[in-house]
Amino acid sequence: MDKNNNKGWLYLLPAILFLGIFMVYPLIDVLVYSFEEQYNFASQTYSGVGLFNYSYVLHDPYFMQAIKNTFILVIITVPLSTLIALVISLGLTSIKKLRDLYQTIYFLPYVTNTLAIGLVFMIMFKKTPYSEGMINMLISTFGGKSVDFIDGPYWAKMFVLCFYTIWIVLPFKILILTSALASVNQDYYNAAKIDGTGKWRIFTRITLPMISSSLFYLVITGFIGAFKSYSDAVALFGTDLNAAGMNTIVGYVYDMLYGDSGGYPSYAAAAALVLFAIVMTITCINMLVRKKYVFQ
Amino acid sequence: MTQNQTQSDLDQIRRKTERREKTQKTIVYVLLTFWAIMVLFPFYWMVLTSIKSYSAYNSEYIPQFFTLTPTLQNYSDVFTTVDLGRYLMNTVIFTVITTAIMLGVTVLAAYAFARIRFKGRELVFMIFLALMMIPNELVVITNFVTITNWDMRNTFAGLILPSITSVFYIYLLRENFAAVPDELYYAAKVDGTSDLKYLFKVMIPICKPTIVTITILKVIECWNSYVWPRLITDDKLYFLVSNGIQEIRENGLGRENIPAMMAAVVVISIPLIILFLAFHKKIMEGVSRGGTKG
């Protein structure tokens, strides 16, 4: 037993070392940072302990803009992407021919580099004096008025960001929902068929309850993911997100930490903890709702 | 007479339902094809733009959906005017080393959790599980400071060290290890096989599918990582592809040279797309077992 004891810890040692240094210690440290006032990165000194960092961050217009952007993004993309994924998955489950092909195609965005493909979206939506861009050409064809989605009005920029985010997150959601739908016991459907149950009723009374736990899993991870979105925005609007007015909360954290506006780990820590508090609150609400509605 | 009538009525009803089902099928296929086009179109557009010449692209006020004069000039440009080759090499080095160390750490930890009985195992495992919920954004600030203090900015060590551990993979592999029957272990013990030998000769071969899956998922994660490399490298010599593409966009080829930019995007995307086409079953299975992006 004693020999086993040492052996066990020896096998775990590398993992514990890495996790301890790069995960557990930072977790405590970030709390400390967020309360140290006027922390100086170069001399590593601070003037006092208190809530000043939080108050600074919460009064920073850039942070407010980031909060607004992030919330709009979350409120639009989470329900919409889950709904689209559900429709596509139901379609996929109802066919046999070409199903594997469609499934493989739909999964493709998952394995692509967010930054790289974001550039493609950027040039498709961008309008410059010498080129109208692909999307604007379509808009003009259908008689609409062309607009610059990358440097133009706020709603247009928000539209591209939401569109790209949905495009990026759908593969994961479709995959989870199709495997949930495939695992529903066919006996239920056969029984309903014998009873002559209508299609809508089958959907609301059998399909939805049976996949409800997967749906909630997607909603919860979707909320968390959308609150933490950042690289999508960088891919579309470049690294200076504050100038574009399209910063996200995570983007604000990194800007505070590093780059032209960086060097303030205390503000970054405070902002990160505000984000963490928001995400925890939303997740808790989700869990409570889940308890009430999820079958089983 | 009446029987004939009933028969024809039945036929009519059957034809009607068949027709309705057919229309429904058609609608489903149209919808699915529509989304497939939405997914594939950006890839088409990127390849198309990358083979248009600079002058041809810029003379099209209204973009063309095909080109009659394809050129590979842009592809040679991205390797000569900007250092895409180096970014690719850096990413390969980063990905290979990170994945290799991650595999070693993960296999050892998973084995300890699954097979070795020692005091405190359950408690440590609970702590590991709790760590799965910690978002990266919270720890990145201190890691940035740590790596800066260790003078590891713009080094591979600085890039790699904080990127190694993934609690989720340890968890995944532990579940798989734990499913291997105990009898094998006791039989090996009786034969005097050491734990390490048992791990390499029995456990790893049996659990190879899971190990392959986590390897591929980690490779994808490394290839696409952006935030950490951006924080820790500002010397172009150590840029990975994600930062490289951002650099190319903002300073490299000139903002207007979009065809060359797209050529760079194609070059960056191809390795992962090949990996995906070769292993798509494994990747999708692995992701559906609980992976998330990012």
Image (spheres, coloured by chain):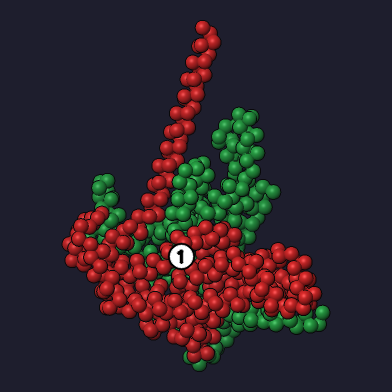
Residue B82: x and y in percent read: 30, 78
Identity of the residue drawn at 20% across and 57% down: B68
- The three-letter code of the residue at mark 1 reads Leu
Where A50 falls versus B291 (above or below)?
Answer: below
In the current view of this chain or complex, which residue is farthest to the right? A1
Identity of the residue drawn at 41% across and 82% down: B238
Residue A78: x and y in percent read: 50, 55
Considering depth in this image, is B53 or A68 the residue closer to the camera? B53
Considering depth in this image, is A94 or A44 the residue closer to the camera? A94
Q: Chain drawn green, letter?
A: A
Identity of the residue drawn at 27% across and 62% down: B49
In the current view of this chain or complex, which residue is farthest to the bottom? A43
Residue B161: x and y in percent read: 54, 81
Which residue is identified by label 1?
Answer: B275
Identity of the residue drawn at 51% across and 7% down: B1
Q: Secondary structure at mark 1?
A: helix
Q: Is residue B44 left or right of residue A65?
A: left
Q: Is residue A109 left or right of residue B209?
A: left
- Write down the quadrant of residue B258 in the picture: bottom left
In the current view of this chain or complex, which residue is farthest to the top? B1
In the current view of this chain or complex, which residue is farthest to the front? B191
Q: Chain drawn red, letter?
A: B
Q: How many marks?
A: 1
Q: Residues within 10 Å of mark 1 (few under 14, many from 20)?
A: some
Q: Is residue B130 visible?
A: no
Where B243 falls versus B207 (above or below)?
Answer: below
Q: Quadrant of the N terminus of chain A?
A: bottom right
Q: Is residue A269 left or right of residue B72?
A: right
Pinpoint the chain carrying mark 1. Answer: B
